[in-house]
Amino acid sequence: MEKFTTLTATAAPMPVINVDTDMIIPKDYLKTIKRTGLGEGLFAEMRYNEDGSDNPDFVLNKSAYKNAQILVTGDNFGCGSSREHAPWALLDFGIRCVISTSFADIFYNNCFKNGILPIMVSHEELIELMDDAERGANATITVNLEKQTISGPDGGMINFDIDPDRKHRLLEGIDDIDETLAKKSTIDAFEQKHSEAHPWV
């Protein structure tokens, strides 16, 4: 998993509340278990017209936001079914950080497992960040995970909270598999001891 330390990138404004996982990645794109290629389906129902062409009114289709890596969005982001394809699609598109006032629990947990930083801020702070994000090409925000700060284009700064263990895992790029492999010697020793005590197993 790629480490998350400091991210300076374009922030895209998406002031929509209750964005569920089906809106993030529609069910038509769930036929794969691969984590790559899902960026094409990200927000597909809002991003594309019925004929498959780009919807020019959707924020991520606008030239200023096509390379956005930060998404500033409304309350209760990631609600609905618990599909891990949702953070996979965000990450495959290039989104490394999502900022909202609240997230659905399962989606929130899945973000950390896939190298995405979900940040919760107050309603007042979200309004400020949404205003920053609406500046188009000038909507550059810096997220510093070590210092737990968000810096806007005018120099304003917001502090955010994060669980220390989740912070450590993102900073070091450690996912569940990495954590298990780090305990390989302990696991091997246990299995050897168990095998010696129960050779018939």
Image (cartoon, rainbow, N blue to C red):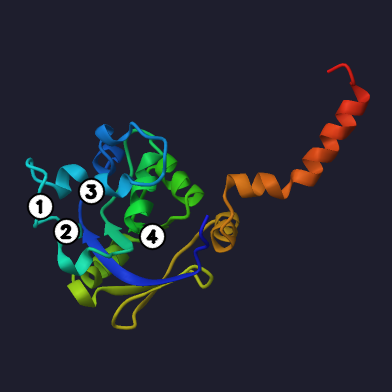
Q: Amino acid at mark 4?
A: Cys
Q: Nearer the viewer, mark 1 or mark 3?
A: 1
Disc 2 or 3, which lies upstream in sequence?
Answer: 3
**Disc ID at residue 17:** 3
Which residue corresponds to mark 2?
61
* Quarter of the image where one finds residue 34: top left
Which residue corresponds to mark 4?
97
Q: Residues within 10 Å of mark 3 (few under 14, many from 20)?
A: some
Report helix, strand or loop for mark 4: strand
Q: Amino acid at mark 2?
A: Asn
Q: Is residue 34 at all visible to an observer of this figure?
A: yes
The span from disc 2 to disc 3 (Cα, nearest Å) is: 20 Å
Which residue corresponds to mark 1?
55
Q: Where is residue 121 shown, x and y percent of the image?
A: 37, 61
Q: Where is residue 142 shown, x and y percent of the image?
A: 38, 74
Q: Are marks 1 and 3 in contact (CB under 8 Å)?
A: no
Disc 1 or 4, which lies upstream in sequence?
Answer: 1
Disc 1 or 3, which lies upstream in sequence?
Answer: 3
Q: Are marks 2 and 4 in contact (CB under 8 Å)?
A: no
Q: Nearer the viewer, mark 4 or mark 3?
A: 4
Q: Nearer the viewer, mark 2 or mark 4?
A: 2
Q: Are marks 1 and 2 in contact (CB under 8 Å)?
A: yes
Q: Are marks 1 and 4 in contact (CB under 8 Å)?
A: no
Q: Are marks 4 and 3 in contact (CB under 8 Å)?
A: no
Report helix, strand or loop for mark 3: loop
Residue in front for this viewpoint, 185 or 82? 185
Q: Where is residue 43 shown, x and y percent of the image?
A: 23, 46
Disc 2 or 4, which lies upstream in sequence?
Answer: 2
Q: Amino acid at mark 1?
A: Asn
